[in-house]
Image: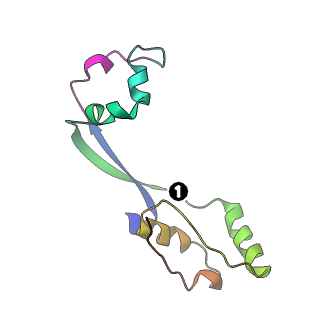
Amino acid sequence: MSSKGLRCLGFAFNDDLGEFSDYYAETHPAHKKLLDPTYYSSIESDLVFVGIVGLRDPPREEVHRAIGDCKDAGIRVMVITGDNKSTAEAICCHFTRSDLDKLKAILGV
């Protein structure tokens, strides 16, 4: 899915929600645990994987023109993203101008 430029989302559940079983809003006493990273691993443990879905999230329309304007002005366009490499490459391929024909992805840390 990522090679087709889709955002991949996994779904899971847990039957035993503990203190979150009656969670209703930000005013719930356990809400502050959802904001504290030290609780994330305990909240996200013992989950049952349900499935995965791919969502199409194309670049906004104005991006195409902005890239064209930059290239016309002699500006070299680079895309920096936190996406998976294959997702980023697939999204960049939406730009059909010759400036992206030489697409080169570099992984960094």
Q: Is residue 33 magenta?
A: no
Main secondary structure of the magenta stretch: loop
Name which quarter of the figure residue 86 lies in: bottom left
Quadrant, the C terminus: bottom left
Residue 104: x %, y % from top left: 50, 80
**Image vertical order of residue 58 relative to residue 89, above or below:** above
Dot 1 amino acid type: Asp
Q: Viewed as shown, does residue 58 lie left or right of 86?
A: right
For the residue labelled by badge 1, is the local secondary structure a helix, a strand or a loop?
loop
Q: Viewed as shown, does residue 41 lie left or right of 69?
A: left
Please give the name of the residue rendered at 49% of the width and 67% of the height, measured from the top-left corner: 88
Please give the name of the residue rendered at 44% of the width and 66% of the height, measured from the top-left corner: 87
User: In the image, which residues are magenta?
Assistant: 14-24
Q: Viewed as shown, does residue 80 lie left or right of 11?
A: right
Image coloring type: rainbow
The residue lying toward the viewer, choosing from 51 and 42, is 42
Please give the name of the residue rendered at 27% of the width and 47% of the height, measured from the top-left corner: 51
Residue 33: x %, y % from top left: 38, 24
Please give the name of the residue rendered at 41% of the width and 30% of the height, measured from the top-left corner: 36
Residue 23: x %, y % from top left: 38, 18
- Residue underneath mark 1: 57
The residue lying toward the viewer, choosing from 101 and 76, is 76
Quadrant, the N terminus: bottom left
